[in-house]
Every structure is written in structure tokens, then in C-alpha cells.
Amino acid sequence: MSSLSLSALSSWVRASAIYRSIIRHGVADTNRNRSLIVFENIFLHVHPVKVREKTLKFSHTYWLGGITLVASLVLIATGILLMFYYHPSVPQAYRDMKELMFVVDNGVFYRNMHRWAAHLMVLGAILHMLRVFYHRAYKPPRQFNWVVGVVLLLITLLLSYTGYLLPWDQLAFWGVSVGTNMAKEAPLIGKPLRFLLLGGNIVSENALLRFYVLHCVVLPAVFLLFLSVHIWRIRKDGGVQGPPEQDAHDEVEP
Amino acid sequence: MNQVPQPLTPVESNDPITIPKRVAMVRPETRPTLRRREETWVMTFPHLIIREVIMFQVVVIGLALIALLFNAPLEGLANPLETPNPSKAPWYFLGLQELLHYFPPVVAGVVIPGLVVTALVVIPYARINLVAGPLWSGDRKRLTMGITAVVSAFVLLFSAFQCWAIVVPTLIVAAAMFLARSEGNGHPFRRFLSAVTLPEWVMTWFVFVATILTLIGTFFRGPGWSLVWPWNMYPPA
């Protein structure tokens, strides 16, 4: 019954009109097909078809930007799952935490994963920034991408900070109270800004709702916007920049 | 036989195999698409993609293991009438909260974070960050005086606020900067130190101070923001 073997099935699927309408290239047996895999795929085509071999070394970037990106993908995935069980109201928000921990299947796992991935994202972003600084990878033409990166770091901190309030436990309430009291001290704009952020003069139900909308809609949208610019510019500026090379001044063919 | 050398004729071509030598005038700020050295290129698929997939899996599996082993903290229902002592911001703001202990709120909460963000944004636009060589390759006498003046000013300023958590790291970094003046006995570490540039010294000082402040704020501050050991942070009521 050779017609039922796995490889026969695989070739039958690959030869079918439906498969060929989705994946329009053959298996990766030639460099042409390997190229097509990259540039016929919307998710991979941010990559060039070929990369410099030295950029694959672990110490070139320590993968810190990539790790931060993966942490943010994990956060989006687990965050959407958590949203199904969460009401941004007092005291239901806190009860939802208890539900997640003791009633919902795998709720405690997804909540844990969301929390630890958030810490990883903040830490990863900081370490990525330090790596880029010490490798002097902010040099022209990458100046503006460094600035985009600083904006992304600030958005990351804001995302983490707005998420901190959502469980509505003592840790959340007082952590956010301490932070927003600091914002109050900014001259002129401090108090109005705090009022706008909290929807009142103290951390209350209004603040919970505002932080929820910021955390789940506004900040992720702004984050994805800047993230696309950040990643697109890496490609445009010649790929990831590792440690400084010797005679960086005249790298160009004389 | 005295052969007259052929005059050079410019040839225009798009075919690098028949006309392999090309002349390019490239300004320093141009995109680095042309490089001096021959480099090895590999196909993105599979070489890069497989590494990305492995990195993705390592991070997700690592996070899943941590999530299985450690529960995210959850305390009692928020109660505006009952202030925990100490009440702390998330860890990445504890450096700032620690500064709040030494400086007026407008300095710790607005001026210093504002300066840090501004300094970060201007890094790639400040000339010193693009051209700096090893610190002591410049005029040594002026450098000695300059560094001494700046470090003394910082030490005096922060001592006035009794902020030893900044004074001590500043003095340690200053000592390392002067240690870098010579390669000493040629030990690899001394050679490494003497190659550090001024921007790297400044960033290292900043990271050092920020780490110390965050660690103190996280582990060594108890009731009334008093200095305590980590195991005494919440004394029994």
C-alpha cells in the first residue's frame, strides 16, 4: 500500500491546487526556493534573503531585542486570554483574580505567565538598550531608531505600570498611588495630568477603568506602531549591528 | 621599448563580472551598504529562521516553567484606608522612590527622570558619542583636572543630601577611571579598562548608581523607608 505512505501523502498535498494556491514555492531544496520562503511570506519578508554570517553569532546581539519581542508576543497572547475573565470594576476585578487562581482552568498559569513575561520584557528592553549602547550601534544611520527604541522603552514601562493596577489588590493600589503621587510634583502640568490619568484626585474605580483601557487598547496600539517602525528600520539600515568593527571610519571600499 | 601607457577610460557597466572594479564615493553618513571586507553571506532560510525559532521556543518554554513554579503575587483586596508600611512602586521605579528619600519630590519625581530620558534621546546626536576614543588618549593634564572637578562637584552635591548610595558608586567609578590611566602590568583587565571611552564611563556610572538605588529600594527599605535587612522588611505587627 505504498500510496498510503506519509511521503506519498505529503507529495499529494503539495501537488494539490489548494496547497499550491497558498504556498507558491517548492520545498527548500534550492537557494531559489529558500529565497522564495522568505520573500513570499508577509511575516518573514522583513528579513533580507541573505544575511551576513557573523550576525548569527550569539554575542553579536545576545538576542536581547528578540527576547523582548517574544516576551511581548507572549504578553499579547496571555493578555487576550486573561481579558475573557476580567471586569475592570471594584471589587469585581479582585474577585476575578481569585476566580483565575482557583476556578478557571489554567487561569493561574496564564496569570503567572503574563506577570513573569512582563518582568522579562522590561528587563529585556533595558538590557537591549545597554547592549546597543556599548556596541555603539546607535551610530549613523541608526540614530533615529535609537530614539524610537527609547520611546518603546517608555511605552513598555507604562504598559507594565498600567497593568500593575489591574488586580486591584493592596500591592497594586499602593504601588500606583506612590507612582502617581510622584507625577503630581511636575510643575504646572503635574496635577491636571494626574487628574486626567486617574479620572479623579485619588486612585479609584475611575482610575481602574482608565488604566484598563490604556493597558489593553491605547498603549498596545501605540506600542505596535512604534515596534513596526523599529523593526522596519533595522532592515532599512543594513540589519542588526553588532560590536564595533575595526577601522569603522573607512569600511567603504576605497 | 618605451610603451606609452594607455590612458584610463571610464567604463560604465552594470555587469560586475566583466567590469569587476568599481569606484564609489561614499560619504560617512551614507547607509553602510558597501563594506571594505569581503563577508560571508548565508541564506536567511534556514540559517537565521531556525535560530529565531529556537530562541522563541527557549523563551516561551522558560517562561512556562517559571509560571508553573512561581505564582504571581496577590495580596488582599485594595483598601484605601489601610496603608501598608512600606508601600512600594513596581521594582523598575524603586530607584526613583529611593531618590525621593533624599531629594524634594520635584527633583526625584520630575527633574531627574526628565534628565535621564533627555540624555538617552540625545545620545546618537552628541558628537562625543560618535568619535570618542579611549578616555586617556586626550590631554591627560586637562582630563585629570576635569574629572577631578566633576567628581568633586558630584560628591559634594550628593553628600549635602547625605545620599551615600550615589556618593560611594561615584567614587568607585572615579577610582576606576584613574586606574585606567595606564595599562599597569599589562594584565588583560587593565588593558580593557584603559580602552574604555568617556561615554562608556558615564553610562557605566549611571547603570551602577541606578542598580544600587533599585537594589536598596527593593531589598533594604522597610517601615517608614528605614534601612532594614531584607528578612526584616515587614516586621510582625
Image (cartoon, coloured by chain):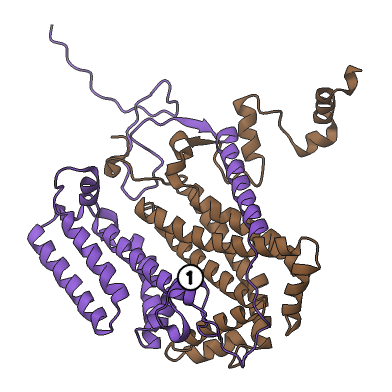
Work out which quarter of the rendered image holds the N terminus of chain B and state it: top left
Which element type, helix, strand or loop, lies under badge 1? Answer: helix
Whole-percent x and y of residue B47?
Answer: 56, 34
Whole-percent x and y of residue B3?
Answer: 16, 11
Q: Chain of mark 1?
A: B
Whole-percent x and y of residue A230?
Answer: 51, 57
Q: Which residue is mark 1?
A: B92
- Extreme right residue here? A1
Q: Which residue is at 62% across, 42% downward?
A: B53
Q: Nearer the viewer, residue B168 or A251?
A: B168
Q: Colour of chain A?
A: brown
Within 10 Å of disc 1 (Cα), the crowding (few <14, some 14-19, many 20+) is some
Q: Which residue is at 42% across, 90% downward?
A: A187
Location of residue A163 with respect to A106 vertically, above or below: below
Q: Which chain is purple?
A: B
Work out which quarter of the rendered image holds the C terminus of chain B and state it: bottom right
- Extreme left residue here? B141
